[in-house]
Each structure stands twice: as structure tokens, then as C-alpha cells.
Image (cartoon, rainbow, N blue to C red):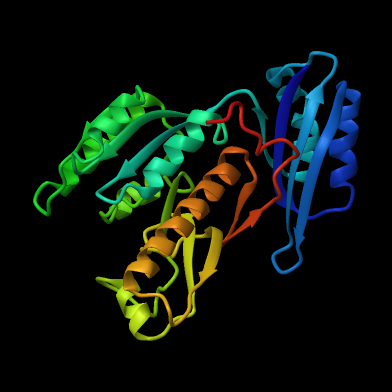
Amino acid sequence: MDKYYLTVTCKSKRGIVAAIAGYLAESGCNITDSSQFDDTQTGNFFMRVSFISEDGAGLDALRNGFADTAETFEMDFAFHDESQKMRVIIMVSRFGHCLNDLLYRWRIGALPVNIVSVISNHLDYQKLVVNHDIPFHYVKVTKENKREAEAQQMRIVEETGAELIVLARYMQVLSNEMSEKMSGRIINIHHSFLPSFKGANPYKQAFERGVKLIGATSHYVTADLDEGPIIEQDTVRVTHAQNPSDYVSLGRDVESQVLARAIHAHIHRRVFLNGNKTVVFPASPGSHASERMG
């Protein structure tokens, strides 16, 4: 039996949930997991439904048959095949903790994506990436060639059919043009000290101020640097006994976890843009399971 997702966004009206459930039941589908949210401030409605097609109805038939319901409620909707892995490009510079973590999760099946390429402005991780049988692209970026470098990066995106770009500590600011073109399809990770500690050595600055919580934030990239809609955040406690190097190590660990969770939510269609914010639904049962261990 085929497993699918249905995602829906529209203005909140009476009868939406009943209409969706009724349509799926009439189409021979069994709902296995469902989440919904009414934003009372904006009047927006969001829903994600996981279901099994017990009578063999395919995506095209389900999509076409849903058109009348969608028109009635003026829905933006999409049907997704759970077995189709999202095509992802990872971009990295010289900090490899997030890249290594993502490659491990990908290798054991805990992060079910198709990594179609890794792009870097340095050669530090070329061997690591190639040893995973993943194409590696070195794209040097300078002030003088930034426009040409981004054009090359976008050609790789288009040629690979990538649906998502992950900035795994990629230490270059993307242009407004690239951010807008890939809106809602670029995920970034950074420490959560902004705006208090900007610039170089934020962990050292935090240490000098006696910070007791270290955190990380993962968000969608927009033209406003580090201010896109937040997907995932987390913190770890520190004390007076830690030194600046401890802060860095603990920070890198939480960055890796937060980025992986944000990607997991995105690829399972659990994240909905809601203005400057996001709606992030809980994971479906079984979606965190790994295909293999080690």
C-alpha cells in the first residue's frame, strides 16, 4: 500500500477537516496521522495528513479528484509520495561538524534524503564527500567573483534538480537574488547569541559575559540576514566551570542537532510558512526510525 502526505493551507472555515477526511475515505484511503492548526490572529488554517491508499489510488488521481474540495475552500494543497526522497544540496565552508553529522544520519537512513551534491568554497571536505560517493563542487568565492560564483551554484542546483539547499555552516552571505529565488528552500544554522553577540568569536563574547545558556537556531534564509522564519531551536546549559573552548564544543553539538531536526521537519512536509513565522507539526510515528544502525 502506498503512503502519502497531504498538506493544506487556506483561510479557516467550518467543515475543512470533515471535507478532507471525507474525500480521503471515499477515495479508499486510511488516515494514519493528522495535525492541524488554526491561527486565530491571521485566520489561516494549516493541516498535514499522512494516509495509506488502500485501494491503489495514485497521486495524480488523488490530486485531480481533490480539485473541487480545494476550490470550495480556496486551498493551497499538495500531495506527496512518502517514498520519494527530497533532493538536497549541502553547502559548507571550513567547519565540518554539521556536515559530518548530516552524512552520518543520511548513511544510516535516519535522514531520508537524496544528497545530490556538496558545494564548498574550500577543499577541506572534498575527500570526505567523495568517499561517500557524493559529487563535490569547489566554488571559490571572493568579493570580486561573488555574482559568478552564485551563478555557478545555481547551475548546480538546476542541473541536479535540488529541492532544498542546506547551509551547514556555509560562511558566505547569499545575495538577495538567490535568497528570493530559493525562498522557503534554503535552511541555515547559527548560534542563538544574536543580536547580543555579533561578529567574530561570539562564544568568547558569551563566555566573557557569563552566559549560562548556549543555543542554536535553524531558519529559512531570506534577504534579511539571519532573520528568516525559525524552524527549530535548542539550548544547552553551561556554568562558570566551562571555558571558551567548552562553549564552542557544546555549541557545535547543539548546532548539529538543531539543523538535523529542522531538515527532518522540512523533508517530511511538517513546516508551513506563516508570515514571518512557521507552523511546525510533530513527526509522524515511525518517521525517526533508521533503516540500519552504524
Q: Which residue is situated farthest in the left direction here?
A: 144
Residue drawn at x 83%, y 53% is 13
**Relative to 29, 82 lies left or right:** left
Residue drawn at x 78%, y 51% is 36
> x, y percentage for residue 30?
86, 28
Q: Which residue is situated farthest in the bottom direction here?
A: 209
Q: Which residue is situated farthest in the front direction here?
A: 241
Location of the N terminus by quadrant is top right
Question: Do we see residue 116 in this rendering?
Answer: yes
Q: In this view, does 201 lie above or below 51?
A: below
> x, y percentage for residue 198?
31, 75
Q: In which quarter of the image is residue 77?
A: top right
**Relative to 260, 16 lies left or right:** right
Q: In which quarter of the image is residue 189?
A: bottom left
Viewer-proximal residue among 72 and 30: 30
**Relative to 236, 134 lies left or right:** left
Question: Do we see residue 164 in this rendering?
Answer: no
Residue drawn at x 32%, y 68% is 245
Q: In this view, does 53 lie above or below 290?
A: above
> x, y percentage for residue 104?
46, 36
Q: In this view, does 150 lie above or below 172?
A: above
Viewer-proximal residue among 236 and 198: 236
Residue drawn at x 42%, y 63% is 251
Q: Is residue 208 above or below residue 10?
A: below
